[in-house]
Amino acid sequence: MRIKEIQLLFQKIFSQRKLVGFLFVLPGLVFFMIFFFYPVINAIYISFTRWNLFTSKQFVGLGNFVELFQDPDFLQSFKVTGYFSLGTCLLLWITSLSLALLINSNLKFTKLFQIFYFVPSILSLTVVTIVWSYMYRRLGLINMFLKAVFDISSIPWLSSSKYALLSITIMMVWCWAGYYMIIFLAGLRGIPFTLYEAAKIDGANWWHTLIRITFPLLKPTFLFISIVSVMACLQAFAPFLLMTSGGPGSSTRVMTLKIYGDAFFRLRMGRAAAESMILFLIMFIFSLIQIRVFKSEVTY
């Protein structure tokens, strides 16, 4: 009886229809296992070892993690990453939501503005970084504009620790705001217009409808945008490498640059893997916090 039940179970699982579906999923599953699952597991193992690519791996337990939190360079990169992520995300959310509200207000030429704002997000980030690097030069477009309009002398945007991180933040907001604007706009247009009509009849002004209707009903959109934008900021690499290489000093040396330097210049693979695990853990914790904050029921 037991054998018959097992046979029926296998027949149910591997029926022709389900087998065809499994075969369609199989390439993606194999790709995921080879290029994501295995590297993550291997990185976790390497983070507990000392390895420079040429010698055998030496197991050191939590030694790499202990050394990292005693390393001022790592703590500095941790702090810079925090400042950049916080500043960029706040400016990005405010800018993209403001643009979405503006376009959703049915003004003239909104389609044209929508395309204009969205174009930077489809450009190559490497190309955008190089162009902005030229614009930030002493005789670049930005300094020439400030001199001509406001009579402000040249600002050392990328060569001063006072302005370097701010310069990259401005560029990233310009580059990403259009993408998040489209997502906010989709959320805004998914809100039933009858709610606004009812609020208007009750005497609610624009600010009350924004706080009591728009923001609560945008919670799912806020959740998606907050998770994606925080992860994007924590993983930002190319702009820092191409614009400042972590300088001046260590004012723009984020964790991704620290990981890159430890892995491929100092050949400290175990330490770089440990830094990657800490960065992954930070992203995971932030995602859990954001889901918990935005998962509450909508009230308006």
Image (spheres, rainbow, N blue to C red):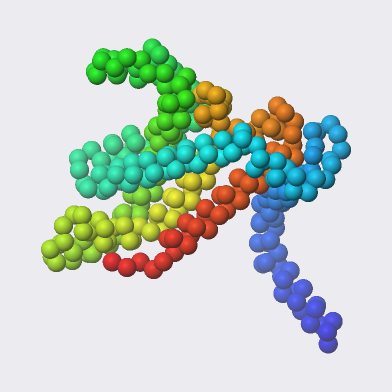
Residue placed furthest toward the top: 139
Residue 5 image position (x, y, % from top left): 79, 82
On the rendered structure, is 179 left or right of 271? left
Residue for point 20% across, 40% down: 108
On the rendered structure, is 214 left or right of 130? left
Image quadrant where one finds the C terminus? bottom left
Foreground: 141 or 54? 54
Tell me how many marks there are. Answer: 0
Image quadrant where one finds the N terminus? bottom right
In the rendered image, is residue 101 in sight? Answer: yes
Residue for point 59% across, 38% down: 75
Residue placed furthest toward the bottom: 1
Foreground: 136 or 278? 278
Residue 183 image position (x, y, % from top left): 39, 49
In the rendered image, is residue 171 in sight? Answer: no
Q: Write down the quadrant of residue 103 in the picture.
A: top left
Would you place residue 211 above or below residue 234 in this image? below
On the rendered structure, is 213 left or right of 133? left
